[in-house]
């Protein structure tokens, strides 16, 4: 028998979240979520939905009409695009450079795609030529890419891939969950047909809402699979010629009809998460998207200097490092998990562990969203130095924070 | 070019949401959502996840281990259960008595089920015998039911169906989205193998999180479709013998592994929505679930008396009315939408329109969750009376609120 008096109100411990995400939400985003609800067809609600579309068009740097939210975590955004775009039997090509490339393969297989992948060792990214060669060989209908893979901290250059896809008549998707808002992403200029993201990384919000954008070309692909459900369909509604999408919740044709002027009932929009998504975008656009990206670059570089100042090595190709995630090699003789444990329990600071081939070999430290700040970087470095010393690693005294601090001062001097 | 200064902070108009849901969230739930985030494997976070499981076991009246949240709206909870339980080609039986029965058929078809349905006219429910007859004829693997269908305000009795399903070796699911917390639901006593719900109806929270519970029998069905994704799988992980689930996001085997002791990474739990879900359950269990259901019955009955006092007819079988939704026939000569418009714009009160065969024929008025309160009922009735009078309907003067008030007084007298 459950004793309800054992359950107090929500009161999480204070944490500075410096892992690969989720990170601390901007307090203004949390306050936006505390707003009272309105009905799903209230003019104020549909007004907010339209504003969300406009705000995310600016963030995605696109004119795409269909720029909206999928109600679920970033993985829901990925699956909604894949299951809506991929017809069973379609060939897809996935360049895999970390865990989230494997995830795209996994989801595509569940969409009954014929999945072809190419791989580079973890810590590297692909040359455009390698991707074009694979496209020529595989002749896929879709190219599925990850922009920033937090498992390796690497950022795949995408700028040249759209032109390659256009030449070979391939639909071009990227999962920008971990990179969006902290690294450049130009949906239209780079020729992307679909992008999905999440709030819990550089956007400074909680997990649970997935902004997406779809090109006209992808819209047409989805419309050919159109199906309006019984109970709300009328004689004016006709089914498309291609096979129906194998999900109702993720049927982006239905999601478009809900976000579009017909406002055809589908799910009940997750209002509080929409409020959060709107505030995340609004705050970045107030700062200026280029400024937000530059802020991520600054604090990511300062963290790198600090980690190097501690005498630690980093992992991965430094030329293709994400601004917002740094992979740090666990030094020989130092146990990785106890370092994370002392940081969390005695300093309230969380850094990330790692997956698959890198398990036990690296830590992952994030500087993103609300936590892409000088105080977060300096606190993390001083705490990490103290913990390493406590466990017997001889770091140059004060080397971490001082090196980062020097970098900040130098950048400020250069800018003035 | 978007001018960000045009976008102010979230500031929705004050609304009293008396439709079929979503309704106003309990302010304590909104405050819970404003709590700062913690990491997804932080001991406090996994502790909250375990607490959510315990709290929802009490709400679902079940000992089921796998009682947890799907990160999406209530429709996501439905689809997660259906796509995980239904193998392509499986026969399912759906008794349809409103729009949401059609939705179950629709989702089941997308899971490539062989879908059989039986129907009663909107406004009625099924006798258990009719369902057993259909089970004998169809021999389904699953029976998919809706407990409360807001499109008709009807509540399907489920208590006898579990025994029928057991006799015929049928898995028994119900969609309790609209009824859960406001009407009795006994998962174990009624022999349910799976139930899904949402926060935005009687639980008094926002849309965006779907509590579900799964029996051991259903767990075994799902485990036979087990698949651990590459990037996190180890040699200890083996695939099941049945066809892999056609969704990654909704693969409840993976969701169990994330909520279970292995804590295998899947999605990043939507922390703020989990905080909301926990607070919704905690508040109901503080009140006492039976008391919460009785409160819904009281205010639903008072609204009914008030509507009758206004000289309006109701729709549907009164013996099977949901406690929390009342379908009111739009009186002849009175235009339905202008009534809703005046209520919303001049009184800030929202009542619901309707779907399909009932479109333009009924309004739907809800009394649920935080809004299952005397003041909400009386305000709605006085406003409705004023609006009807303004549009030329001759209601007995003061008849609505007075009749409801009399009912409240009588109930209070009877109780004392």
Image: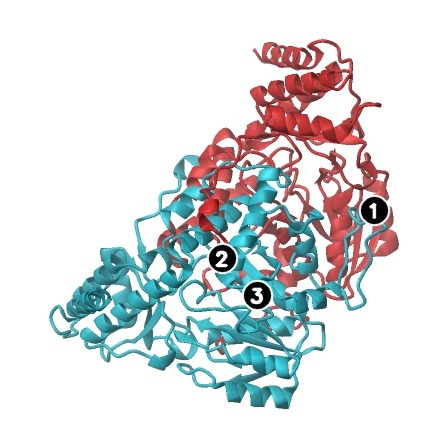
Chain colours: A cyan, B red
Q: Are marks 3 and 1 in contact (CB under 8 Å)?
A: no
Where residue B351 sits: x, y (%)? 67, 30
Q: Under tag 1, what secondary structure?
A: helix
Q: Chain of mark 3?
A: A
Instruction: Tell me if residue A235 can be seen.
Output: yes
In this view, B267 is above or below B342: below
Q: In the image, what residue occupies the spot 42% across and 81% down?
A: A122
Same chain check for tags 2 and 3: no
Q: Chain of mark 2?
A: B
In this view, the residue in front, B142 or A194, is A194
In this view, B49 is above or below A64: above
Q: Chain of mark 1?
A: B
> In the rendered image, which residue does mark 3 sit on?
A78
Q: Is A33 situated left or right of B382 in this image?
A: left
In this view, the residue in front, A132 or A242, is A132
Q: Give the CA distance from mark 2 to mark 3.
A: 21 Å
Q: In the image, what residue occupies the spot 75% across and 66% down?
A: B88
Q: Nearer the viewer, mark 2 or mark 1?
A: 2
Q: Give the CA distance from mark 3 to mark 1.
A: 41 Å
Where residue A305 sits: x, y (%)? 23, 73
Where residue B81 sits: x, y (%)? 65, 56
> In the rendered image, which residue does mark 2 sit on?
B259
Q: Nearer the viewer, mark 2 or mark 3?
A: 3
Labels in figure, total: 3
Q: Nearer the viewer, mark 3 or mark 1?
A: 3
Q: Under tag 2, what secondary structure?
A: helix
Q: In the image, what residue occupies the spot 87% across and 47% down?
A: B133
């Amino acid at each position: 028998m459950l004793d309800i008096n054992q359950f107090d109100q929500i009161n999480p411990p204070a944490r500075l979240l410096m892992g690969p995400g989720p990170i601390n939400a901007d307090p203004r985003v949390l306050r936006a979520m505390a707003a009272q609800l309105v009905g799903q067809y209230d003019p104020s609600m549909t007004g907010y939905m339209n504003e969300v579309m406009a705000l995310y068009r600016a963030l995605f740097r696109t004119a795409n009409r269909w720029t909206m939210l999928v109600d679920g975590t970033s993985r829901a955004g990925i699956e909604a695009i894949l299951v809506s775009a991929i017809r069973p039997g379609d060939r897809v090509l996935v360049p895999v450079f970390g865990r989230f490339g494997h995830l795209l393969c996994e989801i595509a297989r569940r969409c009954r795609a014929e999945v072809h992948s190419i791989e580079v060792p973890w810590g590297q990214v692909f040359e455009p030529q390698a991707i074009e060669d694979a496209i020529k060989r595989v002749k896929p209908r879709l190219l599925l890419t990850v922009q920033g893979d937090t498992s390796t901290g690497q950022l795949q250059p995408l700028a040249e891939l759209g032109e390659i896809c256009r030449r070979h008549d391939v639909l071009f998707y990227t999962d920008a969950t971990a990179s969006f808002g902290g690294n450049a992403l130009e949906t239209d200029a780079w020729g992307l047909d679909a992008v999905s993201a999440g709030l819990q990384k550089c956007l400074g919000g909680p997990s649970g809402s997935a902004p997406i954008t779809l090109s006209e070309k992808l819209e047409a692909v989805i419309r050919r699979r159109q199906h309006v459900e019984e109970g709300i369909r009328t004689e004016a509604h006709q089914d498309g010629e291609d096979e129906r999408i194998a999900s109702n919740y993720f049927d982006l044709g239905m999601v478009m009809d809900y976000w579009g002027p017909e406002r055809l009932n589908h799910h009940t929009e997750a209002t509080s998460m929409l409020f959060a998504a709107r505030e995340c975008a609004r705050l970045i656009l107030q700062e200026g998207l280029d400024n937000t990206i530059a802020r991520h670059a600054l604090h990511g570089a300062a963290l790198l200097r600090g980690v190097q100042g501690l005498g630690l090595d980093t992992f991965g190709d430094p030329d293709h490092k994400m601004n917002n995630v740094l992979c740090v090699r666990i030094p020989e003789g130092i146990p990785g998990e106890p370092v994370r444990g002392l940081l969390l329990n005695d300093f309230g600071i969380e850094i990330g562990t790692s997956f698959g081939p890198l398990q036990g070999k690296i830590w992952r430290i994030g500087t993103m969203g609300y936590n892409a700040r000088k105080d977060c970087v300096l606190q993390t470095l001083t705490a990490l130095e103290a913990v390493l010393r406590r466990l017997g690693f001889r770091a140059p005294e004060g080397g971490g924070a001082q090196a980062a601090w020097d970098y900040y001062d130098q950048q400020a001097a250069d800018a003035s």
